[in-house]
Image (spheres, grey):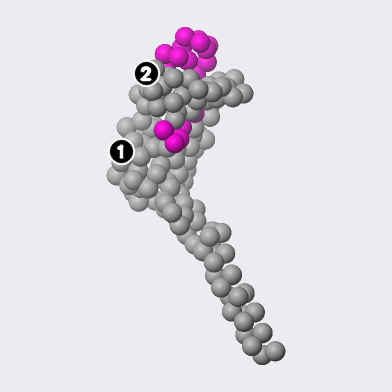
Amino acid sequence: MKKFFIFTAAVILATTGALAATTGCSDDDKPITFNELPAEAKSFVEQHFAKEQVSHVTLDNDVMDKDYTVVFLSGTKLEFNGNGEWKEVDCRYSDVPAAIVPAAIKEYVKANYPNSKITELKRKHGNWEAKITGGLELTFNKDFNLIDIDD
């Protein structure tokens, strides 16, 4: 019986330790300063969002990778990978800076949705997702061919 209790306690401790490591008991969503961002992310913000005021910056330190999030007082949110390359730009109430939107996506939106603006842009698994005013999400492949429309 004593061996059973020791075995059960060991299993509980091992399971608790494994869960703690994978469920966010680590440095998940840790607030950091703007200066702690990778250089590429800081440069991106300074180049494309110089007039914005930073509300907060966080580091999501997962087991497999790091992600950084910058949120501005205007509600605009930027996400970067661990190297500081942008993954997502969500401008909510304004347009995504034209300089970061690939020409083919700009041209497609202008030709097919002339009264719409791009309010969100994501780079995901080689594809590009552009959300336009009105709520449509347009997905383009790496060659900028439209592959999906989601409303």
Going 49% across and 32% down the picture, which residue do you hit?
Answer: 90
Three-letter code for the amino acid on which mark 1 is drawn: Ser
Other-residue count near label 1 (Cα within 10 Å), few / some / many at <14 / 14–19 / ≥20: some
The mark closer to the camera, 2 or 1, is 2
Q: Is residue 21 left or right of residue 6?
A: left
Q: Amino acid at mark 2?
A: Ala
- Residue 119 in magenta stretch: yes
Give the mark nearest the N terminus, 2 or 1: 1
Q: Residues within 10 Å of mark 2 (few under 14, many from 20)?
A: few
When the figure is inspected, residue 133 is found, relative to residue 31, above or below; the finding is above
Q: Which residue is mark 2?
A: 103
- Is 43 placed above or below 18 here? above
Q: Residue at x 37, y 26 (%)?
A: 100
The one of 38 and 50 positioned closer to us in this rendering: 38
Nearest the eye: 56 or 77? 77
Residue 27: image location, x then y, percent: 47, 59
Magenta highlight range: 106-126
- Residue drawn at point x = 64 percent, y = 79 percent: 8
Q: CA distance from mark 2 to mark 1?
A: 22 Å
| Residue bearing mark 1 | 43
